[in-house]
Amino acid sequence: MRRVLPIVVGVDGSEPSLRAVDWAADEAVLRGVPLRLVHASLWERYEGTHPVGDPHRPSEEVMADDVVGVAARRVRRRQPDAAVSTDVLAEEPEYALVRESRDATLLVTGTRGRSGLAEALLGSVSLTLAGHAHCPTVVVRGAQDDRGAAPSRGRVVLCVGTDGKRSPAVRFAYEEARRRGVPLDAVRAWRTPAYETTDLPRTSGELARLHQQQALEALETALADIPADIETHRRTVEGHARSVLAAASQDAALLVVGARRRPRAFGLQLGRVAHGVLHRSACPVAVVPEPV
């Protein structure tokens, strides 16, 4: 019998992580899979006093148990039928959650930040997970309007890469659209390189049409295997991919990007597009690992 892998959520007690818990609880019910809440930290980094009535347990351990306990109760209130388990791991969250991703169907995390400015930025844990997780990673973005916690609303937006290859991200995106009963909006951004407008004898209009046609062809190649029952909209948009996708995310339920992680001297790095939308999207972002 095939093992059902859970959705794993990294929780730290912050409001962004609790919004991630909400999103993951809804997603677990949609998928019919268990939900696993994980709090990972080096306890000795916390400061505090021993709680009254429990002098034998470190205050840091009690704090960690409270974090997952609050998150589990939140899930049960929101989705009473969800199968929930919790764990507290005494190690760096980046390492613990990347390891957890080996046996997960999805890894979910929130952004970090306690102010309006900080909310627009992305924490190092979320970036590390997006760059190293073994399964798709969802970073739940969206502010206090609760868009991040409503997976059945809006569209699913798919970023189609420059080569237009069929990819795991395409399959992930259309399966998410099918679960939600919403359209799939496949977007391919394109631009005419500046050097082509000066060094070639063609007019700027001809060059623009050429690059737009290439973008259309990339869309058709990438979406060749989309099932007929998925309502699919194809769009080519002139502009930087990061800006085009940020605009598309404004009324979306989920933005899906593929990530070909590039080896560097200091480890794997995400491409510019994935990195950019993780910082700028107005909705949750799914980063799907792709073969190099």
Image (cartoon, rainbow, N blue to C red):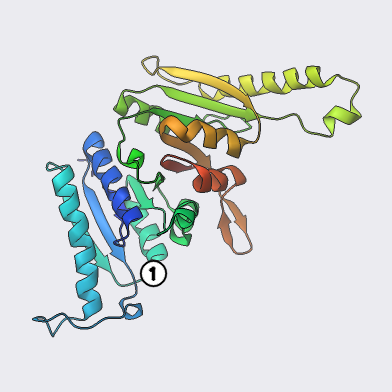
The part of the image, by quadrant, that contains residue 63 is: bottom left
Residue 265 in the image: above or below residue 217: below
Residue 193 screen position, x and y as percent: 77, 33
Q: Is residue 290 visible?
A: no
Residue 82 screen position, x and y as percent: 16, 43
Q: Quadrant of the C terminus?
A: top right
Residue 20 in the image: above or below residue 90: above
Residue drawn at 61 percent across, 36 percent down? 241
Query: Which element is circle 1 on?
Result: loop
Q: Residues within 10 Å of mark 1 (few under 14, many from 20)?
A: some
Q: Disc 1 designates what residue?
A: 92
User: Left of 278 or right of it: where is 215?
Assistant: right
Q: Could you say which is closer to the camera, residue 71 or residue 162?
A: 71
Residue drawn at 35 percent across, 49 percent down? 108
Q: Could you say which is closer to the camera, residue 229 or residue 247?
A: 247
User: Left of 269 or right of it: where is 139?
Assistant: left
